[in-house]
Amino acid sequence: MWISHFTGNRRGELRLETLRPSAGIRWARAASCLAIMTAIAGMPFAGQQQQPPPLTPHPILLPEANRPLDPNQQMEMRERNEKHVSFEAANAVRKKQIDEDTAKLLLFAKDLKAAMDKASDGKISERMIREAEVIELLARNVQTRMKLTVGGK
């Protein structure tokens, strides 16, 4: 675009001069026009509403989580549940045996202590030694059962 303006000379006469703009100004004008046209092209028209993008039907959970189990997987799951139940039953039996053996251990220890207190001369009889061996055996049995836990954990 050419710029025109009036200039005066020494005699007071007006003269119309036309100046050519520099190349940098021309490129700046072209870039701004292009930016304005792109912005206008992206705007919706006055009567038209902008619609949201269509929703694609995606399940909330992954398909692997919703699929039914095949017969082999059902059998494996059933076996795991049965093992778990049998492990719990075996642990319950083990705990019951520990409780019974602990009660016996306490009873034998009280009997041995009473027998030791009655023996005033300080002699230990063979019966007391056997009772002490039985107590020791029972204590080791309780100790090993307490360490043992049946199960897959």
Image (cartoon, rainbow, N blue to C red):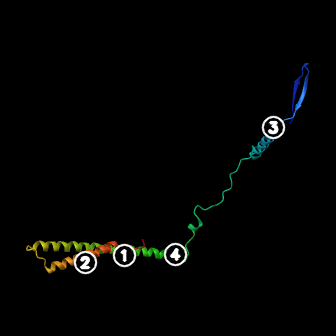
Q: In the figure, is residue 140 to the left or right of 37?
A: left
Q: Nearer the viewer, residue 35 or 26?
A: 26
Query: Which label's residue is closer to the chain start, 2 or 1?
Result: 1
- The residue at which mark 3 appears reads as 25
Placement of 2 over or under 119, stated as above or below = above
Horizontal and vertical percent for residue 1? 86, 36
Secondary structure of the residue carrying tag 3 is helix
Q: Earlier in the sequence, mark 1 or mark 4?
A: 4
Mark 1–mark 4 distance (CA, rounded to whole Å): 24 Å
Q: Residues within 10 Å of mark 4 (few under 14, many from 20)?
A: few
Vertical placement of 8 versus 127: above or below? above
Q: How far apart are marks 4 and 2 (CA)?
A: 46 Å
Q: Image check: 8 left or right of 107?
A: right
Q: How far apart are marks 3 and 4 (CA)?
A: 77 Å
In screen coordinates, is 121 left or right of 152? left
Q: What residue type is labelled 2?
A: Leu
Query: Crowding near pointer 2: few (<14 within 10 Å), some, many (20+)?
Result: few
Residue pointed to by mark 4: 74
Give the numbered dot on residue 90.
1
Residue 137: give its label. Answer: 2
Residue farthest left in this picture:
121
**C-alpha distance separating marks 2 and 1:** 23 Å
